[in-house]
Image (cartoon, helix red, strand yellow):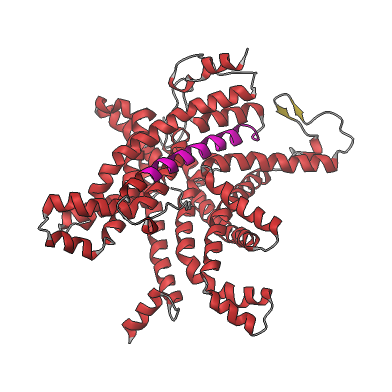
Amino acid sequence: MSCWDIIADYGLRSIGIGERLLPRNEFTLCHQFTLIGSGMIWNIYFGVLALLSGFFFATLLALGKMSTNPIFRRSAEWTIFIFRGSPLFIQFFFAYFLFLSLKQSFPIFSPFTSAWIGALVVLFLNTSAYTGEIFYGALQSIPKGDIEAADAYGLTGMKRFRRITWPTMLRLAWPAYTNEAIFLFHATTLVFFSGFPTTRQRGDALYYANYFADKTFNPFVPYPILAGYFIVLTLIVIGLYGLVNKRLNRHLPTSDRGKIKLRMNIIR
Amino acid sequence: MGFYWSFLTVLLLLGITAPCALGFGFLGAMAARSKFFVFSLFGHAYIAIVRGVPEIAFFMFFVIALDQFLEWSRHKILCPDWSEPIRQGNDFVVCQAAKLPLSSAPQWIHESYGFTLAVFTFAIVFGAFSANVLFGAMRAVPYAQQETAYAYGMTSSQVFWRITVPQMWVYALPGLGNLWMVLIKATPLLFLLGVEDIVYWARELGGSKTARFTDYPHPDWRMWYFLALLVFYLMFTRVSEVVLDRLMKRLTHGQATAAGEAQRRAEA
């Protein structure tokens, strides 16, 4: 069996296309690369969707935390505190069992007990809280002069927000937001280890890496493969965010452009 | 009872890991600063590799890898006349005397061996994070301070221990505080390493019980157990936050930083 056959059989295994059984006694390098790579589909799915949806909710949370209305402020503060103050791992567990008991009274919640949407909801709220705090910090450090200049030009309300406040906020927050995105992708590996069950062994990259390590008693092959995939993913994320950063800062003189620095020191 | 003991397990893990990780971090930062090329390369590689990969991948990798490494080295020492290969197909075979812990050892040794491996793994991973923080903090100490010390005729190790190290803590504290929070939030991952911690007991005790099996029949309470864990972690992080704030205030007192200056102004 050549490597191409294995890729054809297992390349899309994690979403249920291809060979039904996982390999039982053949664990060639090609098997491991293919299956772990196929698991990356889930990591990318969770990461991309949570980031896209979380971005908008995070903006709302940041504005809520800045707001003078105590109801908005309090609720935004509590949301951010709860999701930043507790471990993501426990949040997954709690959400899973919450959906499980909600399902019994409201059948509408039954899809939420499977990972593809239930875990996505948790990741969405979690990344919104972390990003909301980053955006809030950025909103606070918008230069006073920018707002004054906007006032002087007669910009108010929504127009001022859209043209001045929001772009400046993004510019200031972008390096920190890049780190958040990287960590969100790392956090997606927790999904299948925390309550949410895998259906028919369709798991993410770490699930398959763990499968191989358990079967072969040799952690020195699957985990470095996983690490390699994640380093590539991280580099892609940095590249994409760097492009956006360039666009956000395109009107500024080059020496002032905020360069994205890789500072990783967060786990959830 | 096991449930309440497991909270102590978590606190014990934090209590042991934090100083160990700080020690590893200190060594890593010293290595990265070293003028000797090999040490410096080693320090930088340690920091870069551990930070670039999802942490749980590391946790799962290190526990097996450390175990196999220890057994392999004991095998080499204790059974020199063993002829068969260690990796037979998908099995990892060492001689009886090299098994860790020995198969005749009592139960508590097995448990504490697992716990020690977990602590060591945490220390390695968080050592890399704190090495990064300390490395930055050592560079943040104003260079003029060190130049002055050299001008007074101190040797470079004297400068390091008497000038750089005492002054770096104030720069390191925000980063280390952040790490402490991250470490708290990483403790539920102990569950994945096979230690019977609070996540394990919450799942066990919360699961539905029927009168036939136990004295305490109750429906599925896992949701409430995990809610309790969530609240426990929230309170824990909140208390740490307050303590760290106080500590920071104490440390900045009289320092030549912006925060120290603000304190002086407020008092004057």
Query: Where is the C terminus of chain B found, in terms of image quarters?
Result: bottom left
Q: Which residue is pictured at 26% across the width and 42% down the height? A: A56
Q: Nearer the viewer, residue B229 or A260?
A: A260
Q: Which residue is drawn at 19% across and 61% down?
A: A147
Q: Residue at x 44, y 18 (%)?
A: A16
Q: Magenta span has A231?
A: yes
Residue A69 in the figure: left or right of residue A183: left
Residue B128, percent across and down? 57, 54
Q: Position of residue B169 (x, y in %)?
A: 52, 70
* B125 shown above or below A222: below
Of residues B45 and A246, the one nearer the viewer is A246
Determine if residue B45 is in view: yes
Which residue is at a point 14% across and 50% down the rendered structure image? A159
Residue B210 in the image: above or below residue B242? above
Tell me the chief SS of the magenta region: helix
Residue, far right: B81
Residue nearer the viewer, A246 or B135: A246
Q: Name the side, left or right, on which B57 lies relative to B248.
A: right
The residue closer to the viewer here, A172 or B236, is: A172
Does residue B220 appear in the picture of this structure? Answer: no
The question of residue A51 being in magenta is answered with: no
Q: In which quarter of the image is residue A108?
A: top left
Residue extending furthest toward the bottom: B268
Q: Residue furthest front?
A: A253
In the drawing, does residue A86 fall left or right of residue B68?
left
Q: Give the range drawn in magenta.
A: A219-243
In the rendered image, residue B14, in percent from the top left (x then y), is placed at 53, 56
The count of marks equals 0
Residue A244 placed where, x, y %? 35, 44
